[in-house]
């Protein structure tokens, strides 16, 4: 994976409308970012280690949103990605034009969540304040940070097509849409 600037940056919202234009499929659920493109994607992170997951259960939703960041990441050419079920399951693909699909995708973000084997961190901003955060943390793995200007790699990346719940397997989790990160609930 190279960090040179020989690519066009495509916003995730544009990419999710035409996955096959920007990704080479590698099996049913996996794909690689095509040469010539970098995809801007979004991740929910936290600005600092302010509480454990157990303590977050007691926080009101509005308090949790004050503690959430949006991390802007680039998937550089060659990055391997596990696509969320929405992007490979033909049950969902044929529903895209129906009202039930629009309703379904609003309430079920898990079918849109993807994960990558690496990501370049562009920036992070605290939700509701737009304050820049230089090195936010993973909500689920407190030792994992997302420092601005670095390429990060997960501790491991599961590529087994047969793994049940493979969207929640190890990897750098992300959404193609910033709006999805805003409504995403860590719980």
Image (tube, rainbow, N blue to C red):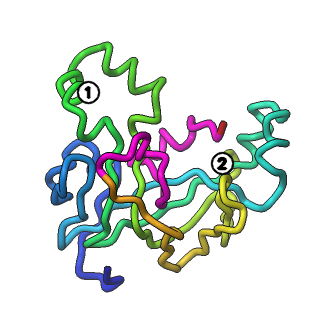
* Measured Cα–Cα span from mark 2 to mark 1: 30 Å
Mark 2 and mark 1 lie on one chain; the one further toward the N terminus is 1
Q: In the displayed structure, does residue 64 sit left or right of residue 124? A: right
Please name the residue shown 48% across and 60% down the image.
172
- Classify 26 as above or below 146: above
Q: Which mark is residue 81?
A: none
Quadrant including the N terminus: bottom left
- Kindly identify which residue carries mark 2: 127
Quadrant including the C terminus: top right
Q: Which residues are magenta?
A: 161-186
Q: In the displayed structure, does residue 115 sit left or right of residue 78? A: right
Please name the residue shown 32% across and 83% down the image.
2
Res. 130 visible in picture: no
**Callout 2 touching callout 1 (CB < 8 Å):** no
Dot 1 lies on which element? helix
Q: Which mark is residue 92?
A: 1
């Amino acid at each position: 994976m190279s960090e040179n600037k020989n690519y066009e940056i495509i916003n995730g919202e544009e990419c999710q409308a035409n996955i096959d234009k920007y990704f080479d499929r590698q099996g049913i659920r996996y794909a690689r970012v095509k040469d010539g493109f970098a995809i801007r994607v979004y991740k929910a992170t936290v600005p600092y280690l302010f509480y454990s997951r157990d303590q977050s259960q007691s926080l009101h939703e509005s308090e949790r949103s004050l503690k959430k960041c949006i991390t802007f990441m680039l998937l550089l050419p060659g990055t391997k990605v596990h696509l969320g079920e929405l992007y490979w399951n033909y049950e969902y693909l044929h529903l895209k034009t129906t009202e039930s699909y629009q309703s379904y995708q609003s309430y079920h973000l898990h079918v849109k969540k993807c994960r990558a084997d690496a990501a370049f961190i562009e920036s992070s901003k605290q939700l509701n304040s737009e304050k820049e955060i230089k090195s936010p943390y993973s909500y689920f793995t407190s030792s994992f940070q997302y420092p601005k200007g670095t390429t990060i790699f997960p501790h491991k990346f599961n590529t087994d097509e047969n793994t049940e719940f493979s969207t929640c397997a190890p990897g750098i989790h992300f959404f193609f849409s910033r709006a999805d990160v805003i409504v995403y609930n860590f719980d």
